[in-house]
């Protein structure tokens, strides 16, 4: 990348800036802040800052050269092996894809409504200087699942469209055993399911309300719960009983009961 463009992209921009790109008769690329015949304008949006990536930690986490740790919003990739935790199928593939996608490029961040998570990581959508939306492309390649946490609702439609394509095509994680749906009757029989991301299918038998949650009861041993704070995002839950649904998320266990927290309607599929 030409030095002038690298300098422009590496600095925060506090007003819309236009850089003109043009090619001379010898095919050499030129960049300038002044218009030129046949030049193509490149607009750097107000408030955007471009940074280099220092380290890719895993498929959805990276470290910038200024030391910030960034967690990609709206998605989740399988874990890679670290410390005492075993790697999950697809984790290394997602990490390597991200390394390759960010090689020889700078990135800009679109920060979420919630700017950091409990670990102090910056929550963001990541775009390369070639306008590649990394979060969406990881999902489109079948290397990440959509994982929406209100209030961070940027690019939900784009992420879900990418996931629909990847699922239908059986790409990446969608051909792995852990990403195949299982019937709710199997949940009671499989102890190893706890604390895993799973797709559970079954019929809602009843619903009940507490001060914090609405519970969708499938069996005596499994329910999915929706925080009442975000209930307005969902279709009328009164219509859920006797409907067959697929719910997606992490299973939690208390004694002989398992539950799944549903944060966004994208984690529920009507069958």
Image (cartoon, grey):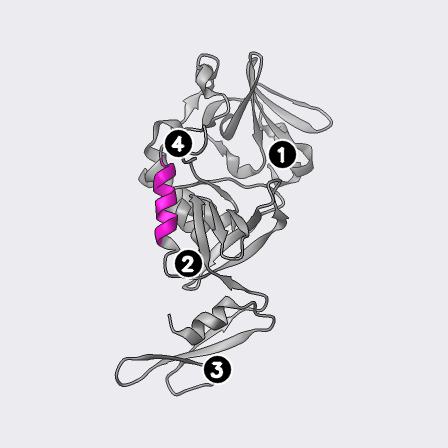
- Residue sitting at 37 percent across and 84 percent down? 38
Q: Nearer the viewer, mark 1 or mark 4?
A: 4
Work out which quarter of the rendered image holds the N terminus and state it: bottom left
Identify the image quadrant of residue 145: top left
Kind of element beneath mark 3:
loop
Q: Secondary structure at mark 4?
A: loop
| Residue that mark 1 sits on | 236
Region rendered in magenta:
90-100
Image spot of residue 141 (x, y percent)? 35, 46
Label 4–label 3 contact, CB within 8 A: no
N-term mark: 1 or 3: 3
Give SS at disc 2. Answer: loop
Foreground disc of the pair 1, 2: 2
- Labels 4, 2: front one: 4
Residue 17, position in %: x, y? 53, 75
Q: Is residue 147 magenta?
A: no
Q: What secondary structure predominates along the stretch shown in magenta?
A: helix
CA distance for labels 1 and 2: 36 Å
For this view, does 59 lie left or right of residue 170? Answer: right
**Marks 2 and 3, the one that precedes in the sequence:** 3
x then y, percent, for residue 37:
38, 87
Q: What mark, if any, has residue 132 been given in the picture?
A: 2
Give the distance between the C-alpha atoms of the residues marked 4 and 2, in whole angstroms. 27 Å
Mark linked to residue 257:
none
Residue marked by disc 4: 87
- Relative height, residue 51 to residue 138 (above, below): below
Q: Whole-Å distance between the Cαs marked 1 and 3?
A: 54 Å
Instruction: Say which residue appears at 27% left-offset and 85% top-offset.
Output: 25
Q: CA distance from mark 1 to mark 4?
A: 39 Å
Disc 4 or 3, which lies upstream in sequence?
Answer: 3
Residue wearing tag 3: 33
* Residue 146 visible in the snapshot: yes
């Amino acid at each position: 990348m030409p030095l002038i463009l690298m300098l422009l992209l590496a600095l925060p921009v506090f007003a819309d800036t236009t850089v003109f790109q043009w090619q001379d008769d010898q095919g050499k690329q030129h960049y300038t802040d002044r218009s030129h015949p046949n030049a193509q304008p490149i607009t750097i949006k107000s408030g955007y800052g471009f940074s280099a990536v220092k380290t890719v930690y895993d498929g959805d986490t990276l470290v910038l050269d200024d030391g910030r740790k960034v967690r990609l919003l709206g998605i989740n990739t399988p874990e890679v092996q670290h410390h005492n935790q075993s790697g999950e199928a697809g984790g290394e593939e997602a990490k390597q894809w991200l390394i390759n996608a960010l090689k020889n490029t700078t990135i800009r961040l679109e920060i979420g409504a919630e700017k950091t998570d409990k670990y102090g990581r910056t929550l963001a959508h990541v775009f390369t200087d070639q306008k590649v939306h990394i979060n969406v492309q990881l999902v489109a390649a079948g290397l990440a699942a959509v994982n929406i946490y209100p209030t961070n609702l940027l690019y939900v439609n784009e992420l879900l469209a990418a996931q629909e394509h990847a699922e239908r095509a059986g790409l990446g994680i969608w051909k792995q055993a852990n990403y195949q749906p299982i019937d709710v009757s199997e949940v009671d029989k499989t102890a190893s399911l706890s604390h895993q991301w799973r797709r559970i299918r079954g019929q809602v038998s009843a619903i009940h309300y507490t001060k914090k949650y609405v519970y969708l009861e499938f069996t005596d041993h499994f329910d999915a719960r929706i925080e009442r704070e975000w209930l307005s995002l969902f279709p009328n839950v009164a219509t859920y009983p006797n409907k067959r649904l697929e719910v997606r998320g992490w299973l939690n266990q208390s004694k002989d009961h398992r539950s799944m927290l549903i944060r966004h309607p994208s984690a529920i599929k009507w069958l």
